[in-house]
Image: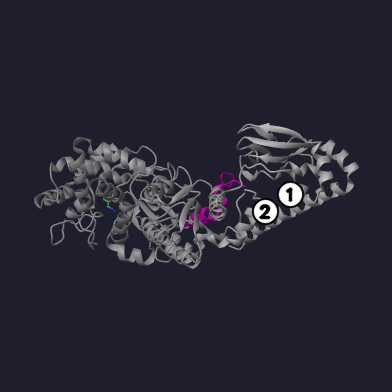
């Protein structure tokens, strides 16, 4: 069943969130914030929860689309944007990263006269000041657009709340003047505060917050829009300060009990972002005396405890990053090889190895892969690393991989990357990286890469490949064992056919009336989807299954100019009537060819199923 057909309420996480919602709705403790008069108008009964997974599935329960003002939650995202735009050095020159242990609106600065961290008002106002320095009069519009990209929709300012905070914001004004006195803030205090009050007055819902948190959890890429909003560098630093300072005075207890980077706002919202997994957004305006939403805190704690989400409680086995490991002897490409070439590949199977990688690759995985490669090294000449199941590669793992590749180059092992998924972030990171390493080839499909390695192995043994060369009927496997009289009787029935490159010899679905012996050129057997089943060359037969079953199951295309000899089925029936022994030999040859193909297919199943 497609996941869109499952109603969210039936999913286990939806059931759990519904239970949290029902239970914590009964908790009436806490107060609606009143120090900004407009906030006092919030409905204390409102309670919404939303979770967005990093693959973009949104769970929602209760008042998840009710809008409220983002308040301090904006601080986390503005910090990420400041890192991204003005750079870590400048940001760190004006704001620290230490938990203050003070309330969010404390007027105390650190001993170096910088705000303690970007999650308290002083640090947040300093970060907003950096954006103002850079964007001048366009600062708020710039921030609005950037914060909207985190949410995946255009956010708007709640004008009454903005005005209410501007009118009642003397404490923040005091902080801002103090910052300017110490050179942390430059320019016009009122302009910076206007932008800060507006950013705090942006209207969001619990659903929006969950998407914004999921964007952080997804290394800065919005899982609904696919947009890369900030770099993973900015995300990692933002999540760090959310972990140490996101929940103000209760930050220590938060890390200890919940262990998910989070940020709260006096408007009643909380965001929590668990890297690589999910973003949580909650809304309930009843807050405790530290400014954190009580029902939101309880939801986060329950979710973390029930599902074991503490960020330090990770499971994982680096070994799962190898989906399959084999050599060219146990899994061949779909190119059918003449017996001589087949024999070369069997004798030299250890020269070509394939590692099919899977999952997001980080340091631990590639460190494990590096050891596996070292164990393959004896006699290895061609190594294929397949990436079709790899969604991402961390920079650290690329550095490690670069060392592995340097060692392989020294040992004269040629490396091919195959299956890099097109149009994905990994394509971007790998292709930039590969530009600096011209020795590493990238080949689209794993099968093509295996064929390339086979060609190299055969070529280095024979000096050439037998591809496309003409051959006489004696060499046809299907006709093996026929004597000269039988062969010449059969030859009299054959009709020569020529095909241009790209022409179709056989169409799936048709009723077969003949089979063909390839005399020169290359043909491919393909499913209608385009998937290649086999590539055949001179000396092999195509459409030979027609001797057993007349419904054509696949297309056959000429990959080059092709010459074939066609044997009509009714002509073959007449031949069999007159040459019973030869007819039996041909059918026995066919049975042997099919048995060989079955053995190859079974080998592949065994190799792939053993992982
Ligand atoms: O600066 C202020 O006071 C508000 N605009 C934001 C405060 C806030 O949300 C504190 N968080 N719990």
Q: Main secondary structure of the magenta part?
A: helix
Number of on-image labels: 2
| Disc number placed over residue 95 in the picture, else none | none
Quadrant in the rendering for residue 186: top left
Give 438 or 231, whichever is nearer the viewer: 438
Circles 1, 2 touching at the beta carbon (< 8 Å): yes
Q: Could you tell me which secondary element the residue under label 2 belongs to?
A: helix
Q: 590 and 261: which one is in front?
A: 590
The image quadrant where one finds the C terminus is bottom right
User: Does residue 7 show up magenta in the picture?
Assistant: yes
Q: Is residue 562 above or below residue 428?
A: above
- Asked whether 153 falls inside the magenta stretch, the response is no
Q: Is residue 255 visible?
A: yes
Q: Nearer the viewer, residue 45 or 423?
A: 423
* 199 to the left or right of 523: left
Crowding at label 1, few (<14), some or many (≥20) Cα neighbours within 10 Å? some
Q: Is residue 153 left or right of residue 125?
A: right
Image check: 215 left or right of 489? left
Q: CA distance from mark 1 to mark 2?
A: 9 Å
Foreground pick, 471 / 359:
471
Please state if 498 lies on the left or on the right of 115 as rendered.
right
* Residue located at (82% from left, 48% from top): 483
Residue 301 drawn above or below residue 341:
below
Residue 340, how many percent across, how many down? 65, 54
Q: Earlier in the sequence, mark 1 or mark 2?
A: 2
Image position, residue 572 (x, y; %)? 83, 39
Residue behind mark 1 = 477
Which residue in the structure is indicated by mark 2? 339
Q: Which residues are magenta?
A: 1-20
| Residue at screen point 46% across, 48% down | 442
Q: Mark 1 falls on what kind of element?
A: helix
Q: Which residue is drawn at the image coordinates 26% and 54% (left, top)?
A: 119
């Amino acid at each position: 069943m497609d996941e869109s057909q499952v109603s969210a309420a039936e999913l286990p996480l939806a059931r759990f969130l519904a239970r949290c919602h029902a239970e914590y709705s009964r908790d009436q403790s806490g107060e609606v914030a009143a120090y900004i008069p407009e906030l006092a108008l919030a409905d204390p009964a409102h309670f919404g929860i939303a979770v967005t997974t990093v693959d973009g599935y949104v769970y929602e329960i209760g008042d998840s689309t009710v809008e409220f003002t983002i308040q301090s939650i904006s601080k986390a995202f503005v910090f990420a944007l400041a890192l991204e735009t003005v750079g870590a050095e400048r940001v760190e020159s004006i704001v620290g990263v230490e938990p203050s242990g003070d309330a969010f609106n404390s007027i105390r600065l650190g001993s170096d006269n910088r705000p303690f961290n970007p999650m308290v008002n002083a640090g947040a106002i300093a970060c907003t000041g950096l954006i103002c320095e850079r964007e001048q009069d366009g600062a708020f519009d710039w921030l609005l657009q950037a914060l909207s990209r985190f949410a995946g929709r255009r956010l708007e300012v709640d004008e009454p709340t903005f005005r209410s905070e501007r009118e009642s914001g003397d404490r923040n004004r005091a902080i801002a003047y103090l910052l300017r006195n110490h050179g942390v803030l430059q320019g016009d205090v009122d302009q910076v505060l206007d932008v800060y009050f507006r950013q705090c007055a942006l209207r969001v819902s619990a659903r929006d917050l969950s998407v914004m948190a999921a964007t952080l959890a997804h290394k800065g890429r919005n899982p609904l829009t696919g947009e890369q909003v900030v770099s993973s560098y900015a995300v990692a630093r933002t999540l760090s300060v959310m972990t140490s300072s996101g929940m103000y005075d209760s930050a220590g207890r938060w890390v200890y009990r919940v262990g998910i980077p989070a940020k709260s706002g006096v408007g009643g919202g909380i965001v929590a972002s668990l890297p690589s997994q999910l973003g949580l957004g909650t809304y309930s305006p009843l807050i405790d005396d530290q400014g954190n939403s009580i029902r939101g805190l309880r939801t986060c704690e329950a979710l973390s405890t029930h599902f074991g989400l503490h960020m330090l409680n990770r499971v994982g086995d680096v070994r799962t990053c190898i989906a399959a490991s084999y050599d060219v002897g146990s899994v061949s490409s779909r190119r059918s090889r003449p017996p001589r070439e087949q024999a070369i590949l069997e004798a030299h199977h250890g020269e070509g190895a394939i590692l099919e990688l899977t999952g997001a690759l980080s340091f631990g995985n590639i460190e494990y892969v590096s050891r596996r490669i070292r164990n393959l090294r004896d006699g290895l000449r061609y190594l294929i690393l397949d990436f079709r199941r790899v969604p991402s590669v961390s920079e650290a793992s690329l550095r490690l991989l670069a060392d592995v590749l340097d060692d392989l180059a020294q040992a004269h092992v040629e490396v091919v990357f195959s299956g890099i998924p097109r149009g994905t972030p990994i394509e971007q990171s790998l292709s930039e990286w590969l530009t600096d390493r011209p020795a590493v080839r990238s080949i689209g499909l794993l099968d093509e890469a295996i064929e390339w390695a086979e060609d190299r192995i055969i070529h280095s043994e024979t000096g050439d490949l037998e591809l496309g060369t003409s051959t006489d009927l004696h060499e046809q496997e299907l006709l093996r064992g026929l004597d000269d009289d039988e062969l010449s009787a059969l030859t009299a029935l054959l009709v020569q056919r020529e095909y241009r490159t790209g022409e179709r010899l056989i169409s799936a679905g048709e009723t077969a009336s003949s089979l063909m012996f390839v005399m020169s050129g290359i043909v491919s057997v393909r499913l209608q989807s385009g998937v290649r089943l086999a590539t055949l060359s001179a000396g092999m037969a195509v459409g030979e299954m027609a001797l057993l079953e007349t419904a054509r199951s696949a297309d056959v295309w000429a990959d080059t100019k092709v010459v074939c000899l066609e044997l009509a089925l009714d002509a073959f029936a007449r031949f069999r009537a007159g040459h019973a022994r030869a007819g039996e030999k041909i059918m026995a040859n066919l049975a042997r060819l099919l048995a060989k193909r079955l053995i190859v297919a079974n080998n592949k199943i065994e190799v792939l199923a053993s992982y």
